[in-house]
Amino acid sequence: MGQQRPFHQIGRRGFLKTLSALGGALTLFGLGAPHIARAMSPVSGRVGLLMPPNGARNLEAAMRATFAITGGITLMTEQTDGGPASTLEKAQKLIAQNQPDLLVGAAGPQGLDLLRPLLAQTGTVFIAVDSGANAVRKSEYSPWVFYQTLGYWHAGWAAGQWAARHLGGRAFAASSFFESGYDALASFQVSFEAAGGTVLQTSVTHVPPDPFDWQTLFAAIRGARPDFVYALYGGDLAVAFVQAYAASGLAETIPLMGAPSLVDEALLPQQGAAALGLRSCHTFLEPDGFATLGCETAHMIVGALAGAGDAGGIAAALREVRITGPRGRLRMQPTTQSVSMPVYLREVRQGASGVRNEVIAALGMVAEDDPRLAPLTEGLRTGWLHAHLG
């Protein structure tokens, strides 16, 4: 996922835009807006929220603002240090002291490994919220765990399918070490090859402690002679890569496509004209991703609590979730218990106020029961974590 702006930088107008869009267009369990208003008013419950140390405060704020509409749901927050042990400790504390109807949190793969026995023992539903950098492995399925994410790996899968049809069958993949330990890269490769393409070479750069020179990468690209390059870089490296690629002259003959982080909106002012024409796939646009997650998650919870008498009823209701909001139509996939969302193709274009991403096509949803996903859902996970992808 691209760099997340702190909550105070979202602005009141942008945040209210999220709430307004969700409130006006939300559909729960096939109900229209009038039904939602009636369903939300009497709902009450207790929700526990686990937050990492520098985690998305906009997620918490969006949930509180959305719950305020119902007037009957209490949100109880526990701060973790970001590690698996702390996640387990704070979850135990919330369950023992507050007896929540369900838990929400940014737990990560290792944290969820520790949480699953606790959730099964206590019959507690947990909604994991994050960027969605990794697909859910079959070994990780649990009736108590649901995944509400921004679908970062979905973007990689959609990019592979689209590129095979429109850019050619020979790709060169380039990724920094800090991006390559996630399914964003693997999902592109698996998808592209499933669509008939060939990844000629994958280059992982900036592997510590070795120094790196962009010209080494560019020489490898020239030697491979691909139809296009797919790049995964974020933050300062994304700025440097896009500028260096444009300056090298490669863009004149070898098109560049990237992961969402490569042309994050926060980076475009620095990348400037070098980013023009660069295409990427993404699952959310504006406003802020974590604010969107907070609103969506809160509305899912409202719908689940409205018709459920116990934890088993909450889980059953969540499996049937259908939402229409700022990201489009969302649904919970019953097998993986993970939210699917539309993926959009974007292109960097010149706007009145500078360069910006513009949506040029809607690419539909990624079906997580697609047998072509087996290398992701049945394969090993590297498991490393860092601040950029959360």
Image (tube, helix red, strand yellow):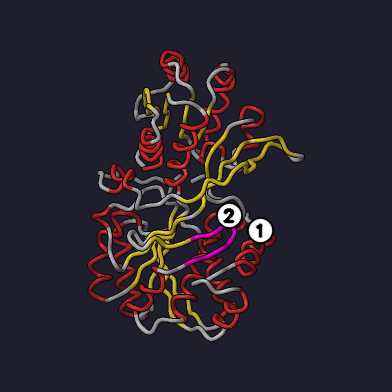
Query: Looking at the picture, does residue 53 appear above or below residue 64?
Result: above
Was residue 219 drawn as part of the magenta stretch in this picture?
A: no
**Residue nearer the viewer, 285 or 83:** 285
Q: Secondary structure at mark 2?
A: loop
Quarter of the image holding residue 31?
bottom right
Query: Looking at the picture, does residue 210 appear above or below residue 85?
Result: above
Query: Looking at the picture, does residue 306 appear above or below residue 291?
Result: below
Q: CA distance from mark 1 to mark 2?
A: 8 Å
Look at the image and tell me whether residue 178 can be seen: no
Magenta stretch prevailing secondary structure = strand
Write the start and end of the magenta stretch as one range.
322-330
- As drawn, the residue found furthest toward the right would be 352
Q: Which x, y percent locates residue 154?
A: 44, 47
Q: Residues within 10 Å of mark 2 (few under 14, many from 20)?
A: many
Q: Are marks 1 and 2 in contact (CB under 8 Å)?
A: yes
Check disc 1 and give the amino acid type: Gly
- Residue located 63% across and 56% down the image: 10
User: Left of 175 or right of it: where is 244?
Assistant: right
**Residue nearer the viewer, 374 or 153:** 374
Quarter of the image holding residue 40?
bottom right
**Residue nearer the viewer, 70 or 195:** 195
- Residue located 56% across and 66% down the image: 62
Check disc 2 and give the amino acid type: Asp
Residue tagged 1: 14
- Residue located 42% across and 45% down the image: 153
